[in-house]
Image (spheres, helix red, strand yellow):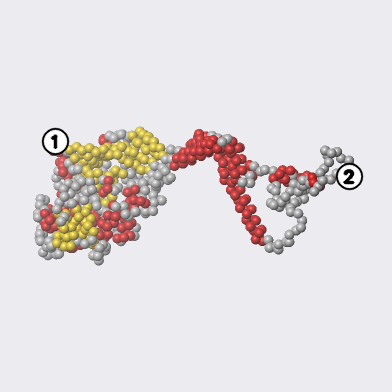
């Protein structure tokens, strides 16, 4: 390299460095404040006076804090939705309609299976209330049994004993069989209404459920003896019917020809062939109209009762089980074609001797999935196996979760639900603890201790029919004189009796209008809107743009970290050089003069700028001309004659 180039490089190296290549963070920040387009930062550096500088620092920091606050609010509100409601007028598909008789099986068909249970139930009523059931029907007048416990021992009371509790002695109860008081161990759960308590009775009725080894028991009490007797009867009823094959239970229930007397849809006649059998364990044979098994889904062309579904149902009250159900009529549920009908949860009851009109409004909802909500599209991301052959819904998830938990803990599935894979229905012969296990799980499920409510999520899209129900007396007094004989003649092949009005119920299901309401969720924000809002906040508080943001990122992150990294690297190199250098002995003091340690001697002489920046050597005295000693000056002898006023005095 030529000497000229070396001098230029040396001068450039020793000149003050500013900008992103500044040696310290302080100089970098000063350079940024003097050159940035962001308002406020320059005023911090150029303002005169400490007070003004502090004020501008406060204003700038406040503006930055407001920017962060507003931008955080924009980010948090990004995943919000806006709801839009649209109303369409179009031809609507008719929903699936499932109809069930409240009484699941004909009493004449199951009476031989329930004879012992009913005898013990009547004895319990006699022991509790002091009266026997009044036999008002011919089929019950023919029955005969002993009202005492002679003969066979009471096996159902032995399995699940009925007890009478006194409020004053909560840990003791009177046994129905012996009439003696016994000590009650374990937990006592009172199944009463949390909404209304009409009166407090001094005595409550309940039953005790124990595990097989009788080491753990739970007692369930009820405010009313009616509820206690029915719940106790239902437990044993489920246990007995669980052992009956499905084909036999279908034959014990009502056929479609018996249940459906007349049928009209959209002004056209229909019959039992338009209904699909659906067997429900607690409601027997149910029949679904317009099911997915049909080739085409039926639709209605107009609104109004004349263009919907009209059926007359044969209830047959004479075949009702007196202890299983306490009301007469039918249950109906409106649902989608691919949806499982939970008739026991959301079914609508139909009264006998009445015409029930159900007007519908269709509402279709579409929700946004994650990250906007926790809904699921098809249930594939929910950790619960769907044991129903139907589309996913929140009810299906909850019921599937409960049945899965019951199979895991009890070893069997509840009789009133579909059978999970690799499981069988609960019965006392194969699963002696299932009653106790079922009630314990049900109590935990109600109190949300099983975790089903936390893992099950709502479906993102679903259809809902808003129902409006109205009742009218049917048939009227003047029309029943001809209507009932005609219906009796029409059903003579299926029913060998004269019909009366309490055996029939009329049902009308129709669209009130063809207006379909769609509720849709849409994202309230987009990426473009979010960036625009960010730019507005930056421009409002600091007159900043995207280029300024990039400049801030470069200076405060890239350049600052590079300066810190260079310093740390330089320290590491110096530490490594000192560690690797061999120790050298101390040299004797040199008689030569002291050198300036700050001056690095090299081939090129220092420039004027670098020389000014060199600090003086510590303890060294700069060379210079010493002051003159005036007493050493002597006059020459050539000046022999002196004036008197200029003559020097003699030295002592």
Q: Residue at x 58, y 38 (%)?
A: 45
Circle 2 sits in a helix, a strand or a loop, which is it? loop
Which is more toward the observer, 132 or 521?
A: 521
**Residue with the most extreme bottom position:** 213
Residue found 79% across the figure and 45% down from its top:
630
Task: Please give the name of the residue rendered at 51% of the width and 38% of the height, measured from the top-left corner.
Answer: 58
Residue indicated by mark 2: 637
- Residue 271 x/y as whole percent: 26, 43
Residue pictured at 29% horizontal, 56% vertical: 441
Q: Residues within 10 Å of mark 1 (few under 14, many from 20)?
A: few
Q: Which mark is residue 548?
A: none
Q: Position of residue 291 (x, y in %)?
A: 32, 45
Left or right of residue 150: residue 38: right
The residue pinned by badge 1 equals 478
Cα distance, mark 2 to mark 1? 175 Å
- Image quadrant where residue 80 sits: top left
Q: Secondary structure at mark 1?
A: loop
Report if the CB atoms under discs 2 and 1 are less than 8 Å apart. no
Tell me where residue 602 appears, x and y as whole percent.
Answer: 75, 51
Answer yes or no: is residue 114 visible.
no
Image quadrant assignment for residue 132: bottom left
Q: Nearer the viewer, residue 28 or 186?
A: 28
- Residue 328 placement (x, y as % from top left): 18, 46
Q: Is residue 560 found left or right of 238 in the rendered image?
A: right
In front here: 245 or 14?
14
Using the rendered image of the protein, determine whether residue 444 is visible from the camera's viewpoint.
Answer: yes
**Which mark is first along the chain, 1 or 2?**
1
Comparing 281 with 647, the one in front is: 647
Q: Residues within 10 Å of mark 2 (few under 14, many from 20)?
A: few
> Can you tell which of label 2 and label 1 is closer to the viewer?
2
């Amino acid at each position: 390299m030529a000497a000229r180039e070396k001098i230029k490089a040396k001068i450039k190296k020793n000149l003050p460095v500013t900008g992103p290549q500044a040696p310290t963070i302080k100089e970098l920040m000063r350079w940024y404040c003097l050159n940035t387009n962001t308002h406020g930062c320059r005023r911090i550096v150029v303002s005169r006076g400490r007070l003004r500088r502090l004020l501008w620092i406060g204003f700038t920091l406040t503006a930055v804090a407001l920017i962060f606050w507003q931008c955080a609010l924009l980010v948090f509100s990004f995943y919000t939705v806006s709801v839009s409601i649209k109303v369409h007028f179009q031809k609507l598909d008719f929903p699936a309609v499932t109809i069930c008789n409240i009484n699941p099986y004909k009493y004449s068909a199951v009476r031989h299976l329930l004879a012992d249970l009913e005898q013990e139930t009547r004895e319990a009523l006699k022991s509790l209330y002091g009266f026997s059931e009044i036999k008002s029907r011919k089929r019950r007048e023919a029955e005969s049994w002993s009202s005492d416990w002679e003969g066979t021992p009471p096996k159902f009371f032995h399995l699940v004993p009925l007890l009478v509790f006194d409020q004053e002695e909560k840990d003791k109860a009177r046994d129905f069989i012996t009439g003696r008081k016994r000590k009650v161990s374990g937990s006592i759960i009172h199944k009463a209404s949390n909404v209304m308590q009409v009166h407090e009775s001094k005595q409550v009725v309940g039953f005790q459920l124990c595990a097989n080894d009788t080491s753990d028991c739970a007692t369930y009490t009820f405010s009313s003896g009616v509820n206690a007797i029915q719940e106790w009867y239902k437990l044993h009823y489920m246990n007995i019917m669980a052992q009956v094959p499905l084909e036999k239970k279908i034959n014990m229930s009502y056929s479609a020809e018996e249940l459906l007397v007349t049928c009209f849809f959209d002004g056209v006649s229909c019959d039992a062939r338009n209904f699909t059998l659906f067997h429900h364990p607690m409601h027997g044979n149910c029949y679904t109209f317009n099911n997915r098994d049909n080739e085409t889904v039926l639709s209605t062309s107009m609104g109004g009762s004349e263009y919907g579904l009209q059926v007359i149902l044969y209830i047959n009250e004479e075949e009702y089980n007196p202890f299983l159900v306490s009301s007469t009529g039918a249950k109906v549920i409106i649902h989608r074609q691919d949806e499982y009908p939970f008739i026991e949860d959301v079914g609508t009851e139909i009264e006998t001797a009445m015409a029930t009109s159900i007007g519908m409004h269709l509402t279709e909802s579409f929700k946004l999935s994650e990250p906007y909500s926790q809904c699921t599209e098809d249930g594939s991301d929910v950790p619960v196996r769907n044991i129903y052959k139907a589309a996913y819904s929140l009810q299906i998830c909850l019921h599937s979760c409960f049945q899965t938990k019951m199979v895991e803990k009890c070893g069997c599935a509840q009789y009133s639900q579909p059978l999970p894979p690799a499981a069988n229905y609960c019965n006392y012969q194969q699963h002696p603890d299932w009653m106790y296990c079922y009630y314990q799980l049900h109590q935990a499920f109600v109190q949300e201790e099983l975790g089903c409510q936390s893992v099950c999520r709502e479906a993102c899209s679903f259809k809902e029919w808003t129902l409006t129900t109205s009742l009218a007396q049917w048939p009227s007094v003047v029309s029943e004189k001809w209507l009932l004989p005609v219906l009796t003649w029409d059903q003579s092949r299926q029913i060998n009796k004269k019909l009366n009005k309490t055996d029939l119920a009329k049902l009308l299901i129709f669209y009130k209008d063809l207006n379909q309401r769609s509720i849709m969720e849409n994202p309230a924000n987009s990426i473009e809107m979010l960036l625009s809002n960010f730019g507005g906040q930056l421009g409002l508080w600091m007159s900043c743009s995207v280029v300024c943001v990039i400049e801030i990122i470069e200076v405060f992150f890239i350049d600052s970290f590079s300066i810190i990294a260079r310093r740390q690297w330089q320290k590491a190199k110096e530490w490594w050089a000192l560690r690797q250098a061999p120790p050298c002995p101390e040299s004797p003091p040199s008689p030569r003069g002291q050198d300036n340690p700050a001056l690095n001697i090299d081939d090129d002489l220092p420039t004027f700028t670098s020389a000014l920046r060199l600090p003086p050597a510590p303890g060294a005295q700069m060379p210079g001309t010493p002051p003159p000693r005036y007493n050493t000056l002597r006059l020459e002898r050539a000046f022999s004659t002196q004036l008197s006023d200029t003559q020097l005095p003699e030295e002592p």
